Amino acid sequence: MRAAIQSAYGSPDVLTIQDIEIPVPKDDEVLIRVYATTVNRTDCGILWAKPFFIRFFTGLFKPRLRVSGTDFAGKIEAVGDSVKQFKVGDRVMGFGGMGLQSHAEYLTIPETKVITTIPDDVTYPQAAACLEGAIYALSAMIFKMNPQAGQKALVYGATGAIGSAAVQLLKYFGVTVTAVCHTKNLELVKSLGADRLIDYTSEDFTSDAERYSFVIDAVGKSSFGQCKPLLLPGGSYVSSDAGPRSENIYLPLFTAMLGGKKVISPMPRGVKRSVSLIRLLVEQGKFKPVIDREYPLEQIADAFRYVATGQKIGNVIITMPFTP
């Protein structure tokens, strides 16, 4: 099979497309023919090993996993002897934040990991686009905020994979959403359900007169200090990035101890719960993933370069040859 091999940390130039052996599933694993996957911020973090502490999970001196990739959509080709939840022919999608080796034509994964069936009428690229960004929006942000209907939230960076998912998911919980984005994307974000729009090219969102229960920075370009005045008493701020001087790693502890306005840790929890809800909403037509571009596996380095620009809208998909 063909796979994107990451032999070292560094720029996309370290990636090579090679022919390697198809993995053999263990007793508790399924073998999946991958038809679509994404290049996302998690993948970029693993590729560059930034922030540095990610190396404690992915390999201190070089990548622990040979093949890159953290999510997938595909079809089960074989199952281990003890597998009970899935069968050959099932269309499935899944995610693994520290790596699944999914930038390849085949992968194996234990049936107990984050994997679920794909709803009917959802294509493989659409399924792949329902994973990393939406999972982080729920597991690292929204579930931790425990939003209630009628509350207000501001989403900064509402067009990325996390931000576009956060807008839709907050609306599902009945939250009134103000979304911050570029002029050219105002109509897209409005179509996702945003109640109010701020064009950051002409207005500083941190000067907004509205006050919110939640501020979500989906692009990691703000700080708690900048956004704190936007919060109501007891309100919560969360960023998809560690923040200036990695402050979002330790501020959740200190702000929780002090009470009042607080920072939420961006570490995801309850990923399986998130995937179950996302699948349900997709099946019900209440969540629509946003896709920016699609690249074949051979052009995966270009996909990484594009994602690294920070200009992508929604998700960037890697596609494999499809066999019905």
Image (tube, rainbow, N blue to C red):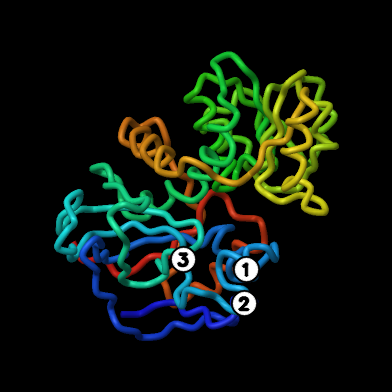
Task: List x then y, in percent, for residue 131.
Answer: 44, 49
- Residue drawn where x is 30% and y is 66% of the image: 108
State the separation of the CA atoms marked 2 and 1.
Answer: 10 Å
- Circle 2 sits on which residue? 9
Q: Nearer the viewer, mark 3 or mark 1?
A: 1
- Residue drawn where x is 75% and y is 48% of the image: 221
**Hey, what amino acid is under mark 1?**
Arg
Which corner quadrant of the image does residue 232 belong to?
A: top right
Q: Is residue 33 above or below residue 94?
A: below
On-image quarter of the N terminus: bottom left
**Hey, what amino acid is under mark 2?**
Tyr
The tag on residue 69 is 3
Q: Answer with left or right where residue 129 lies relative to residue 267.
A: left
Task: List x then y, in percent, for residue 314.
Answer: 53, 49
Dot 2 or dot 1: first in sequence order is: 2
- Circle 1 sits on which residue? 55
Q: Could you tell me if the residues under marks 2 and 3 are in contact, i.e. CB atoms within 8 Å?
A: no
The tag on residue 222 is none
Viewer-proximal residue, 49 or 308?
A: 49
- Residue drawn where x is 61% and y is 69% of the image: 305
On-image quarter of the C terminus: bottom left
